[in-house]
Amino acid sequence: MPDVTFTVDGKKLTAPAGTLLIDACRKAGIEIPAFCYYPGLSLQAACRMCVVRQEKVPKLQTACTTTVAEGQVFITESPEIAQARKATIELLLGNHPLDCPVCDAGGECELQDMTFKYGAGESHYVEVKHHRDEQQWSPAVFYDRPRCILCYRCIRMCGEGMDVWALGIHNRGANSVIVPNDHQQLDCEQCGMCIDVCPVGALTSGSYRYKTRPWEMSHVSTVCTHCADGCKVTLGVRSTNDGAEIVRADNRDKSGINNDFLCAKGRFGFDFVESPDRLTQPLVRNAAGKLEPATWEHALRVAAAKLKEIRDARGGAAIGVIGSDRTTNEENYLLQKFARTVLQTNNIDHERTTDYAAFAHALAGTAGKTASLRDISSACAILLVGGNPTEEHPLLAWLLRTNVRLNRARLYIANSKPIKLDRQAKATQELPPDGFKSLAAFLDQGTSDFSKSLQAEESLVVLFGEEFRGEAVENLVAWGLKRGNVRFAYLGDHSNSRGAADMGLFPDLLPGYVPIEAPGAFAEYPNRPAAPGKTLPQMLEAASNGELGALLVVGANPVSRAKLDHAALKNTFIIVQDLFLTETAALADVVLPAASLYEKSGTVTNTYGDIQMVRKAADRAGVKPDFEILVRLAGAMGVDVSTLVPFGKRGTTGDLGQSRGAQAGEADRHAVWLEANNLEPKLSPFDPLALLDEIERLVPGYTLDRINLFAGNDVHTKLEATPGFVPVQALSNPDLIVPAHDTLFTSGTLGQYSTALKQLTQHQAKELAETAAD
Amino acid sequence: MPRLVSHPDEIKLVSRRFGMGATNIDRYLELGGYEAVKKCLAQGPEWIVEEMKASGLRGRGGAGFSAGMKWSFVPKQSAKPKYILVNGDESEPGTCKDHLIFLHDPHAVIEGTIIAGLAVGAKMGFIYLRGEYRYLLEIMERAVADAYDRGYLGKNIFGSGNEFQIITQTGAGAYEVGEESALMESLEGKRGVPRIKPPFPAVVGLYGGPTVINNAETIATVPQVITMGAQAYAALGTPRNGGTRLFCISGHVERPGVYELPMGYNLKKMIYEVAGGIRGGRKLKAVVPGGSSTPVLLPEEIDIGMDFDQVGKAGSMLGSGGVVVIDDQTCIVEFALRTISFYAHESCGWCIPCREGTDWLKKSLTRFHAGFGTDADIGNMQYLAENMLGRTFCPLGDAAAMPTIAFLKKFRKEFEDHLNGTPCPFAREGVPQLTVV
């Protein structure tokens, strides 16, 4: 649309013709109040708050439905307009319970703000207010009808945004009420978006309600720890006797690619942090064979002594290291560096849920062929093969829906089962369960309407799930590359499994998928062993056979998924760093209580390759971040830790203002600038960002746009494996890939410790049973 | 069956077949039925639209928009199907004319719908009756079935090669769906709430297609206009207000009923001569000239011609033709309460000023009429109504605010008489007090 010029409050503004006046004004910094208007959702014009005066038009007009045209003249603030808005607020307050002192939204309520601005300080009414008792619709959602102003945001968010359509209206006129789909219960995805968009305290969250006053919280902007989409999340944090607790998670500042979207896990599943099962003291197995609490010094000394003893006596090959899909990039990088340079072993792996190595191999020698979430959210055409994003990648599903709805993107889905996103698809293609391997050949035949439409697309983003491993990934990528103008994303599990792979938690690949045998690779690593090590199953097998002297497990629970004779592991000295006494930790000789992702700083990379900052929000006495634990372990082994972590004057600091008490989710701008310009001296070897320089320098694809990263934005990394690289074992066995198959309410081991997620699972199981009974 | 009335001043066009058994298709044909549509088939769409424009026929639903103009807004070419929608959701208190048309002359509605379809190039028409007219649906459906049997509806109407289908539908009992866009929502099976305009129905209407929505009386008038010719029709009324219309005279008159009178007919004459004057020789207190949403007129204001322009000049509206006559033994506060109770009950709840405003007006008036009003109430009610006026999503809010403002302004003394615990001055033996639920 061509630009037009119009006048608002005497100012000349320019915007494309047809832009909504309310949007054009907001862009120009002119705030027009509105309850029902919500960007991206259908228009209502129901609240009548955004009324403005348009020249030559007799009645006041709603700015949310007025489109701008050349030469129009508007007034957005005048006594007449202020009176109209005030009268509307008076009407709302007439039936409102005015229970602000106990309302969750008190202090962050749009009705309060508007009343403050337009001053509806006096009530004209003496009659009894309408009252209805509060209802609990699910463990996550409560509805307080008297507070509701009927802006219908929740209904539209649920229907248009989530494609769930679980909310509607009953009755009419002043008796109108919002109702859930299953009598008085909500049968839905429990995302809590309805609560999020509610401008008042009508919809409240089961986990947050009556817990705190909003102004008692600090807000920390970090990244969700659950799935591999990496939503930005703002954690509301409050001090406690033994640290700081998280009381709420949302993303109201709309930062990040997820804007205000969060799923049930991101919004409610943070409570695993507060689980009573949390380990807060190191445990060491005593002479009687029982785990007993110990001091950090003691536990680290025992672990370090054993690792040193085995390395020196039997060589590094007798030690195995298993890393995590949830720890930060810095921690994963440090772990493999520690394994290779200190423990002298290449026996390092992680619980692979996705075949990123095959993906890297398939893309070797190309550039710019990976799709970031931002690419996906603006792509014209998308091919989704395998997977079920609604369950496993809620943000991706949200972005696909939004892209189809608002930008008319064309979504093609090929899958072996129907999925919810089929409803947004332009075309779908059913595949036999084993049809993924031969998908490329099928698409090439071009006889079906599906492949014909695909071929007609000028550009394409290809998203594929864990059904693709090894050769299937190679085939699909080769098909796409041949087709041209294509980008790919591989849908994995867990918040940093991509980071674990990128940081080289492989027995045969160094960070950035550099083959361990590549000449000159990582030359600055002192004395790293040259031969590839063992994969995770091989390590467990060796341990069962008594061939492995020690096993260091960081944030992983391999015992839970492997068929193992626990007794056979008795000759292996097991050290576990974890939040909980997992099945693996229960077998350990030393258990070191680790901090969760919400209790540390660093970076994580989502499955699309977008790297983001993680900032410390909560705190828990007794636990330590895995980064610090590794540095201390190395120190206790007598290593000069500055060889592992360049600190002091040799590096930069990156605590991003936490030491200065940066508040409200904002990065400390001064720190960001110093950081970006490499000016601030590093003080601590426990600062994970001390390693960021080294990661940028040594890991292919991790050349970062730092200013954007530190400002809290997502930065796309590049998957740039050397052409012709030959992985030794990583590619050879697709059976190494064990997908998590998480649902909307499960999150691997972590999710088992979330009360909120467990309640939601039970609620949904009940709903499902009732539906089946009907 | 309701009693039919008549008066020598009437010019019976729309009502000419009332009481003559025209629900029977053969009888309708005997009475000259389906001749207009044949004329239209011969003359073509442009001619029909021009005739309608020249006839000065203005919408009988209440807004009074020129029917011919409305039809001319429909785009000639459209990717989506075009529709004719007959608004038979007659719900305005005081209005009962469409009811008689459906009851006595259903084929006139069908014939008018076909003509409208020919004019704009639509192949499908919907006749939508209010939910409470469910008993009329049978008559309408019988008539539609007969028209199909005779080949007047279907793939090849009157052997002309033109297609036209009609579907009948009732609402579920909501005044709001009388508003054209809410009617479309309702017809599509959704909640009856109005749509944002623009786009207007002529461009994006039912199921997204260009749609002509006309009141049932307007549509039933169309065959008459075609038969007698636009000029002759227009000449019956006043300038810019062509023809006749059905006036529904109710309230305290000797001979209430529906009379077809030329546009511009004097209101005073209508009350005192046509309807036989005030019942029991009492005195006139007030007149609501065009359905309950129109501002009330005082006895000294009624010497006016009943057309859209003259009533507008007098500070009210011709509206839907529902003339409600109020005698001097009626309590205006009670009348206002009755009126606002209706709108509070019928507000769809979509927008804040109407949803909350009608509710508070009803609450305040209930208390006020019961004798518990305060000095501040009169001002508060006026403030509330004035702040609803022109601020609501659709005209329902105005429909509630306008009469309230007029009652408060023109009968302030009567409101003041209810103050200070005084019982309603009109309360008397044998007249039950209004209780509003």
Image: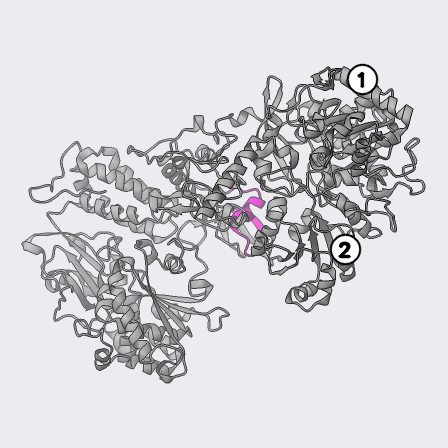
Above-or-below relation of B95 to A290: below
* Relative image position of residue A282 (x, y in whole percent): 71, 19
Q: Residue at x 87, y 22 (%)?
A: A308
Which image quarter is the N terminus of chain B in? bottom left
Q: Which residue is mark 2?
A: A477
The reply to whether dot 2 and dot 1 touch (C-beta < 8 Å) is no
Q: Is residue A11 magenta?
A: yes
For residue A255, the mark is none
Query: Observer-nearest residue: B39 or A747?
Result: A747
* Relative image position of residue A263 (x, y in whole percent): 58, 40
Q: What secondary structure is found at the residue carrying circle 2?
A: helix
Q: Residue at x 35, y 82 (%)?
A: B158
Q: Quadrant of residue A292?
A: top right
Chain identifier of the residue bearing label 2 in the image: A
Above-or-below relation of B154 to B253: below
Above-or-below relation of B236 to B180: below
Which image quarter is the C terminus of chain B in? top left
* Relative image position of residue A173 (x, y in whole percent): 34, 46
Query: Observer-nearest residue: B70 or A559?
Result: A559
Cα separation, mark 2 vs mark 1, equals 48 Å
Chain identifier of the residue bearing label 1 in the image: A
Q: What secondary structure is found at the residue carrying circle 1?
A: helix
Q: Amino acid at mark 2?
A: Val
Q: Residue at x 67, y 20 (%)?
A: A280
Region rendered in magenta? A9-31
Q: Which residue is mark 1?
A: A301
Front position among marks 2 and 1: 1
Q: Amino acid at mark 1?
A: Arg
* Relative image position of residue A634 (x, y in whole percent): 83, 23
